[in-house]
Image (cartoon, grey):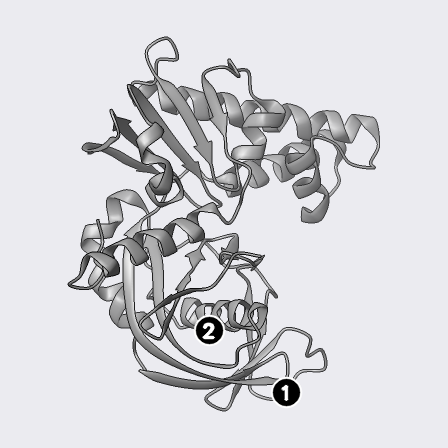
Amino acid sequence: MEPVKDYQGMRIIGIDNGYGNIKTANCCFPAGLTAHDVEPVFKDELLVCGGRYFSVGAGHKEFTADKTGDDDYYILTLAAIARELNVHGLTDATVRLAVGLPLTWVSQQREDFKTYLMRSQEVRFTFRGKPYRVEIAGADVFPQGFAAVASQIRDFQGVNMLCDIGNGTMNIMFINDRRPAADRMFTEKYGTHQCMLAVRENVMRAHHATVDDSIINRVLRFGTADIQEDYLTTIRETAAGYVREIFRILREREYNPALMRLHVLGGGSCLIRNFGEYDADRVTIYDDICATAKGYEYLCEMALCKGGGAHAT
């Protein structure tokens, strides 16, 4: 369990609001949400706020370039806060949120996202049958990808390419001699959801069958699943094609394994490990899916300790 970060009575909670999963330093759950006007039958992941009922983790959150377009990410953020507080045995807390946005979107969307998350200074809600009172004292927005390695930045000597593969986007940046290259940051709409769509299409074309997402996820994560071999081959071949396309995009962004090191993180890093062809001596794969949320907390704490409040880098 990651220890709670406390600054002058505020609990710093890092939340990685992904399109596939919501991650905190200690928790990970699907970024799905279904709203109900009346209390639903199944209440295991039920959040009640403002007289409405929300089944957290149910359904699928579609990709959107603007996370403030509806209330979904606000409710998912409340669920993430509750999960993280519950890990530490808390139900009443003053919280400083540390969140993020894709690299090239931070500057334009930062203020809107902060306003969206801080719409109410005090929030009272119930999650999993337990009442919570949360005072949101602040929200700070940091760049995705970089946050996950910020605490290790001293190790990034020479030229390094960072590739953060999420469900909706793939963020690419260069870190040269421990310094982020602000003019070499890119966001591509080529997350693992694109691989999922390709797998479904190829399985339907080759086998005239619909494959459950849980099976696809298992193959992508572990490289195998308890299914018939010809189906498994189709999924593996599709995943390998997706990974080849990732490396093609990286080469378009000037990736050269002879001249730089590659660091791969995010939920899609397992695809590189399972289906990619690369030099393991020059490619580092980060397995911790919560690394970005932990990084947000680290950046927020460092900024607060320096004085003047946290701000996006």
Dot 2 lies on which element?
Answer: helix
152 lies above or below 16: above
Dot 1 lies on which element?
Answer: loop
Outermost top residue: 258
Q: Quadrant of residue 59?
A: bottom right
Q: CA distance from mark 1 to mark 2?
A: 18 Å
Residue at 38%, 56% (x, y): give it: 297
Note whether residue 67 is visible: no
Q: Residues within 10 Å of mark 2 (few under 14, many from 20)?
A: many
Q: From the viewer's side, name the closer residue of 37 and 165.
A: 165
Q: From the viewer's side, name the closer residue of 214 and 212.
A: 214
Residue at 66%, 83% (x, y): give it: 40
Q: Which residue is mark 2?
A: 78
Q: Quadrant of residue 38?
A: bottom right
94 lies above or below 103: below
Q: Quadrant of the N terminus?
A: bottom right
Q: Of tags 1 and 2, which is closer to the observer?
A: 2
40 lies above or below 12: below
Task: In the rendered structure, find residue 39 and report the number of the disc placed on it.
Answer: 1
Q: From the viewer's side, name the closer residue of 201 and 55.
A: 55
Note whether residue 27 is visible: yes
Q: Residues within 10 Å of mark 1 (few under 14, many from 20)?
A: some
- Residue 27 position, x and y percent, is 56, 59
Number of numbered tags placed on the structure image: 2
The amino acid on which the numbered mark 1 sits, given as a three-letter code, is Glu
Query: Is 122 displayed left or right of 75 in the figure?
Result: left
